[in-house]
Image (tube, helix red, strand yellow):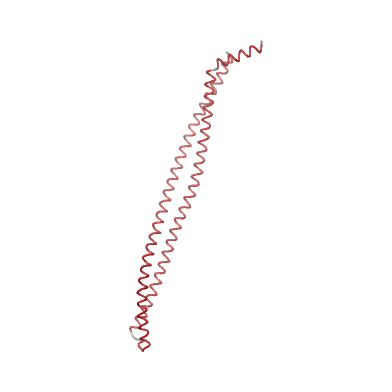
Amino acid sequence: MAFATVIAAIGVASAVGGTYLQSKSRGEQSRALAQQSAIQAKANRQQASANRKISAASVKAEEARAEQAKLESARRRREIIRQGQLQRSTALANASNSGAQFSSGLAGAIGQVTGGTGANLVANAENTAIGQSIFASNQSIFNAQSVLAGQQTGTNAALAGTQSAFSNAQGQGALGQSLFNFGVNTVQNSETTGRVLENAFTQRVG
């Protein structure tokens, strides 16, 4: 009977230990899942924020390109007008060679040519400014994408850590289940096992 009592006590201790490990495992698994959810939620917010920045920068770049196309069209129109003015000024220059160099027509022609040059310089400055705006927008897109990539790397590392914790907790739970099962089986079979051990001990002593 003493053997059975000892075996039963071992079984009870094993079952209690297994129950504790299972309970601890469930708590750790719950915490790991909660951490995963929090990390994923944060990653989703970061993704949404980056997407908004990329979208805004893309819209700005497209607006700049549209403005550039409009200015380019205006520049072409000015160039057509300038060519016409140049032809006119050439005719007036020919007239000046005939003695009309001090006429008001010649002065007007010179003013038109000068004005066309100034307009082209303004158009060039505007195109340069738009080009810089497009570059800045593209740089903003690149920066947002780089930040997002770094955040994603951190998210993946954090998720890997929580997954490892979850797996460890599962292993602990499995061990707890095994100990619990062993303890229950030991208690259930304690009397039989005790009699076998007592008989073996008695025969050996005798």
Residue 131: image location, x then y, percent: 43, 64
Residue 33: image location, x then y, percent: 46, 37
Q: List the single residue furthest toward the top.
A: 206
Residue 163 appears left or right of 53: right
Q: Say which quadrant the N terminus sits in.
A: top right
Instruction: Locate residue 2: give its quadrant.
Output: top right
Look at the picture and state if 15 lies above or below 110. above
Q: Which residue is drawn at 48% across and 34% down?
A: 29
Look at the picture and state if 117 lies above or below 9. below
Q: List the single residue furthest toward the left.
A: 104
Residue 174: image location, x then y, percent: 52, 30
Residue 59: image location, x then y, percent: 39, 57
Look at the picture and state if 9 lies above or below 168. above
Q: Say which quadrant the C terminus sits in.
A: top right
Instruction: Locate residue 72: give its quadrant.
Output: bottom left
Task: Looking at the picture, tell me which residue is in the foreground, 40 or 65.
Answer: 65
Look at the picture and state if 24 lies above or below 196. below
Q: Which residue is drawn at 48% across and 47% down?
A: 152
Residue 115 appears left or right of 144: left
Q: How many labels does the image show?
A: 0
